[in-house]
Image: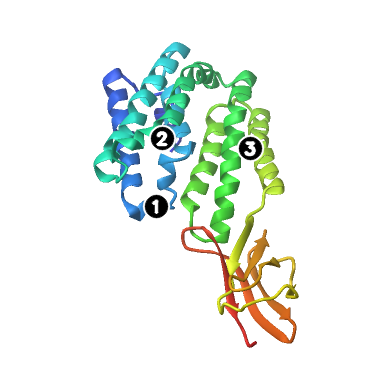
Amino acid sequence: MKKLIHKLYGGLRFTWPRLIAYAVGAAALTAVFLIFPFFEGTSFHRMGVYLEAWIFLAILIMANCKTPLESALKTFVFFLISQPLIYLFQVPFSSMGWSLFGYYSYWFFLTLLTFPAAFVGWYITKKNWLSLLILAPVLAFLGTVFIETARETVLCFPRLLIAALFCLGQILLYVYLFTSNVWQKLVGLLAALVAAAFILLTTKAVDVNWSMYLPDDPVLTESASVTVEDAGIAQVSVESTGESSMVRVSSTRLGSTPMTIRDGENEYHYLVTIRKDAEGNTVIDITPQNS
């Protein structure tokens, strides 16, 4: 395994024909993940939307170049070929047709950035403290993505499990490959750990605030009030009354809690459930109980 890793990161020859084939292959694979509905919402679908897979492919190029200029040129050309091809391959299969290229502007901007980024990024192969300084933002980014995807996996197993393991694997691989001593390895892991901890502490697994109709369509009056048994699960208030009575539900947690609406002599009892569906979307269910 050790020999294979060092062969992949330093022992490959990215000639220009091979680089072009590499770019076309990456674009074709990404287009497959985007075209077929089977992959929607999965770790594979992320390749056409997020950056972690493209960081992996770019670093593979950088690690097999002899000079920073070669790294910059080949990484830039790789993105210049692969990104528009992804949209081109999708055109015959999409109802948007050529309008898909409206999304290319974001990736074109990133493509321009790959030239200076890959020029500087090549120096991670020197395995010194400057290399680690250059690598640290990548490790922090991957740590952030790891905690976000791992959180989704926990909430809706096994959704995004492969993406989480892929990011974790990259962190461990780059710390192993591009550092030369134990102190550098510890600092590299710390960069990823701090970024992950920051995301974990400052973001919420669920954050919804929706207006909803009640399932049995009660006609509420201005005197209606709501009591929720566990306000830590959900906060509910009357949004509108009359024929179009609605409630507003907000939550930052998953779970279920009973809810009672008192309106004069009438009482309406519900169970409010905050959950994740199979695609990882947050869903609010309001189920009538005995009224």
Res. 63 visible in picture: no
Viewer-proximal residue, 285 or 275?
285
Gap in angstroms between the C-alphas marked 2 and 3? 30 Å
Mark 2 against mark 3, which lies toward the viewer?
2
Marks 2 and 1: in contact by CB < 8 Å?
Answer: no
Residue at image position (38%, 19%) is: 74
Residue placed most toward the observer, 287 or 19 = 287
Would you name the residue on which mark 1 appears? 40
153 to 213, vertically: above or below: above
Q: Which residue is mark 2?
A: 103
Q: Residues within 10 Å of mark 2 (few under 14, many from 20)?
A: few
| Residue 96 in picture, x, y percent from top left | 32, 42
Label 3 sits on residue: 192
Taking the view exactly as shown, the residue that stands out farthest to the left is: 92
Relative to residue 139, is residue 265 drawn left or right?
right
Q: Position of residue 269 (x, y in %)?
A: 66, 82
Instruction: Identify the residue at image location x=45%, y=22%.
Output: 62
* Distance CA(mark 3)–CA(mark 1): 28 Å
> In the image, 191: left or right of 77?
right
The type of residue carrying mark 2 is Tyr
